[in-house]
Amino acid sequence: MQIKPVQPRQAGLSELALRTEEPPITWLMSAVLDRPKLISLAVGFTDSATLPVEEAADLLKRLLKNKSRSRAALQYGSTRGLPELRQLTADRVSSLDQLSQPIPSDNVVITTGSQQLLYLLTEALCDPGDIVLVEDPTYFVYLGILQSRGVHARAVRMRPDGIDLEHLEQVLRELRDAGELPRLKLFYMVSYFQNPTGRSTGFQKKLAALDLLRSVERAAGHAIYLLEDAAYRELGFAKTSDRSALAAKRNERVFYTGTYSKPFATGVRVGFGILPEPVLGAVLRIKGNHDFGSSSLLSWLLAEAIHEGVYERHLACLRVRYQRKARLMERAMKEHFPAGKAMWEPPQGGLYFWVQLPKTVRTGARSKLFKSAVANDVLYVPGEFCYAEDRARSKPKHELRISFGAASESDIRLGVARLGKALEKG
Ligand SMILES: Cc1ncc(COP(=O)(O)O)c(C=O)c1O
C-alpha cells in the first residue's frame, strides 16, 4: 500500500518542523549507503575494528548474572541518570581537572549522547530570535539545532591556538552597539581537538572568554554562559593536562558536556553534562518530557567499564591507534594531494584534518570538486557546512574536513589517493 504525502503547508506541521532543514549529517550518512564502494572520509564515526566487542560482551554477561544489578539495568532509571555513573563521571572529570573540591554528582546528568544535551540546553536557554556565539567554523550538527530552533548564530574567529579573543570582544561590542545583548544567551565552544579544525582552546583563553562574557551581563540583563563541549577531550594522542572551564574559580557560568560515545563505543551513545542550577533543573524538567531518563542498561555498561578499568585500557589503545591513523593520513595527503594546493595543521588528537585549498577552489556539495570526489568514490565534508549563517561575513567555501576515525588504514590510503585525483582535476 502507498501512503500519499500531502504538501508540508497543508500537513499542519509546526513552525519548528517547517523551519527545520535536513541536517547535512543525514545526507552524508545516506550517501555511503547509496554507493557501496564509496570510501567515506566524511563521517566522524569511530574505528569499527577497535570497538570493544569482547569487553562489552563480558561486562554485559557479568552484569546480567548479578541478580539485583540485572533487574536495575533492565528497568527504567531516573531522569537525572544512574547514580553510580554520575558519581564515576564526577570523579573522572574532577581528576582530569585536578580539582581540589570534587564535582558533586548531583550536578551531573546522563544523556542519550551529548548531542541530546546540546539540544536540551539550547531548548532550555533559547527562544526563537535569540543569539548564540559559535566558533568559526564549528560542529555542524550544532548549527542544525540553532537553525531548527530559530536561533541566530554569531561567529567568533579561530586561530591556530583556539578562539580569537580580540574578535570575541569585537563581536560583543557589536552586539552591545546594536542593542542585541539581551538576546545573547551563550557561547558554544568545542574546546579540545575541535570538530572540524582539530584546534584546541587552552585554559587561559577559556578564563578570558568567561571574563568577557561576564563583562556584558549587566547590559544583557541576565547570565551569559560558556557551553564547553569536551567531546574529544580524552582523544588526545598524548594525555592532555589542559583543564576545562570547570576549573575556573568562578565556574558558575560553565556548562560542561562530555561523551562516552567516541572514547568507548559510538553505538552505546551515553553522554553527560555538568551543569549549575537553575539551568540543570530546567534541563531535567525538559528531559523528563523527552524521555524521563536515558537507557539504564547502557549506563550500567559504562559504569562497569569505568569501574573495572576496561574504559581506561580501551582509551589507551585508541590514542595509539588514532595517532597512527592520523600520521598515515597525513603521509597519504603529502603523497597524493597536488603540491602546494592543500594546507592543513596536523592534529594532536580528535578525529579530523581540516584542509584549506586555494580560495578559487570550491568544495561545496554542488561544486566540481565534490562531484568529482563522489564520482571517484570518496566522500568528504564540505567546509561550508561548518560555518554559521552570519551577516557579518560571507562563508568561506574552499575548505573540507576529512576524518581518520572510521576508515581502515587501507581505505585511508585509497580514499586520500582518490581525493588527490579529484583535486588534480578541480
Ligand atoms: C563536537 C561534538 N559534540 C558532540 C557530539 C555528539 O556526540 P554523542 O552524541 O555521540 O555524544 C559530536 C559527535 O560527533 C561532536 O563532534
Image (cartoon, rainbow, N blue to C red):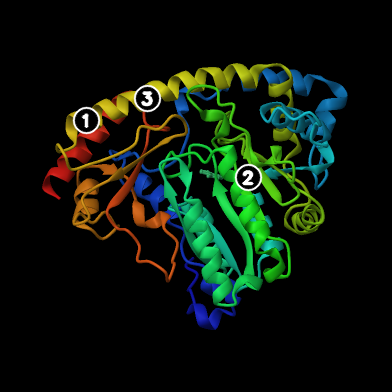
Is 196 placed left or right of 255 in the picture?
left
Q: Which amino acid is tagged 2?
A: Leu
Q: Which residue is identified by label 3?
A: 325
Is 406 placed left or right of 246 in the picture?
left
Q: Is residue 196 above or below residue 26?
A: above
Q: Residue at x 66, y 50 (%)?
A: 117
Disc 3 packing (10 Å; few <14; some 14–19; many ≥20): many
How many numbered discs? 3
Is 418 placed left or right of 385 in the picture?
left
Q: Which residue is identified by label 2?
A: 207
Badge 2 marks a residue whose secondary structure is helix
Badge 3 marks a residue whose secondary structure is helix
Q: Residue at x 24, y 28 (%)?
A: 332
Q: Which residue is identified by label 1?
A: 334
Q: Is residue 328 above or below residue 1?
A: above
Mark found first going from the N terminus, 3 or 1 = 3
- Tell me the number on the disc at residue 57: none
Residue at the outermost left position: 425
Position of residue 50 measured from the top left corner of the image (x, y, whole percent): 49, 22
Q: Which amino acid is tagged 1?
A: Lys
Q: Is residue 10 above or below residue 211?
A: below
Mark found first going from the N terminus, 1 or 2 = 2
CA distance for labels 3 and 1: 14 Å
Residue at the outermost right position: 68
Q: Nearer the viewer, residue 244 or 179?
A: 179
Q: Find residue 229 and report its image quarter.
A: top right
Q: Is mark 1 within 8 Å of ligand 1?
A: no
Q: Is residue 268 above or below residue 241?
A: below
Q: Which amino acid is tagged 3?
A: Lys
Disc 2 packing (10 Å; few <14; some 14–19; many ≥20): many
Disc 1 packing (10 Å; few <14; some 14–19; many ≥20): some
